[in-house]
Amino acid sequence: MTGREGRERNTDGRPAARWRALALGLFGIFAGSCRAAPTVTLIEPQPGAGYPVTSAVARAESGDTIVNARFQHVRFHMWPGVALDLDQLRGRMRSRRGDGVVSFDDPRSFVLDIDTGTVGFPTADLSRLMNTYVFAYPGAPLRALSFQVENGHLIQRGVLHKVVDIPFEMTGEVSVTDRGELRVHPIAMKICSIPGKGLMDALGVTLAKLLDLRKARGVRVEGNDLLIDPTNLMPPPAISGRLVAVRLAPDTLVQYFGGAKPGTLAALQPDTAAPNYMLFRGGTLQFGKLFMVHADMQVIDLAPSDRFDFDIRQYQAQLVAGYHRTTADDGLLVFMPDLAALRPKTVAGVP
């Protein structure tokens, strides 16, 4: 045997070429495995933008930008000192962001499309909204507004600025227009504590001539009627839906939304029999640093004896004070205390 032949054979006498072929085959398998490995998308925080997720990741995982939502016995804070009472409300949270995410950290990131439900608006909260948001601009024609329900009518008091400040009180009937607006029609008016509606009628003076509401949010005037659009009246998150009826309850303006097309209502069933909750399914939800794709989350009141007091601008404190549990199908049950339970208590009138 020559030296070359010895080098070409192993101790078993098999040609070394077989080992080279086997080695090349294994290398090919490992190389193929490396090429087939999935890519990992790293999500890094951007200044002033929270923790965004790319649209490719969000849509690939969730398949849509719609989060179906259901609210039962929830007092939902929209603005400091302003909350809506949501009873058996169903709809969808539709993302307004390019990545399709509905973010609890950014109320401007989504629109709440209401299919059907009841929304109670306490008159004290309505008063605060008008003073701190709707008419909170320089030169506003109305200020120091307050609302109250008396004898089946809505009583509005405040100051009308027309060259000079004029205190007024208006008693109105409340109804809903064909456009889904809230109409407040005055049946009595006092100006500086003096009955003035008859004088206004005699002089041909209307509220439309007295009030310039072009800068006001969600409120306009037509003749003597105030027309309020409940979907444009509130700060973010934006609301859409059709107002179909209204009634006056003690200290509350009760609004009924409906008119959804057949088959559009989300058939959401909660995971527990909790009386007060918020339920979210579908789409992609963001809360803090977490993203939940194919969302399935029920937020439950830890104190069910009264409404679930929830504030979207302070929910992190409620989240930290509560706890959560993962369900068998990878859903999430989140238990939160009421917002009021987290506020400092006073002792003998001293904070």
Image (cartoon, rainbow, N blue to C red):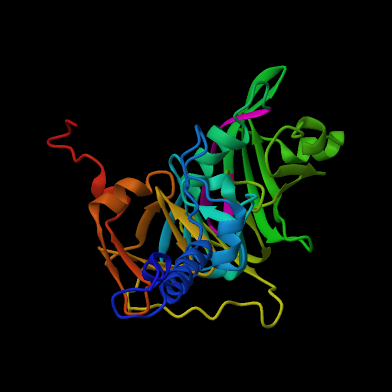
Task: Tell me if residue 239 comes above or below residue 245 in the rendering.
Answer: above
Q: Quadrant of the N terminus?
A: bottom left
Stretch of the chain drawn in magenta: 141-155
Task: Tell me if residue 268 comes above or below residue 82 in the rendering.
Answer: below
In the image, is 42 to the left or to the right of 305? right
Give the residue at the far front of this rendering. 1
Task: Tell me if residue 312 comes above or below residue 65 in the rendering.
Answer: above
- Asked if residue 92 can be seen in this view, the reply is no
Q: Residue at x 30, y 80 (%)?
A: 12
Camera-side residue: 198 or 301?
301
Give the residue at the far right of this rendering. 204
- Asked if residue 300 can be seen in this view, the reply is yes
x and y, in percent, of residue 301 in the image: 31, 64
x and y, in percent, of residue 74 in the image: 41, 62
In the image, is 16 to the left or to the right of 249? left
Picture quadrant where residue 180 is located: bottom right
- Main SS category, magenta section: strand
Camera-side residue: 215 or 140?
215
x and y, in percent, of residue 67 in the image: 55, 65
x and y, in percent, of residue 126 in the image: 53, 45
Give the residue at the far left of this rendering. 348
How many numbered discs, if any?
0
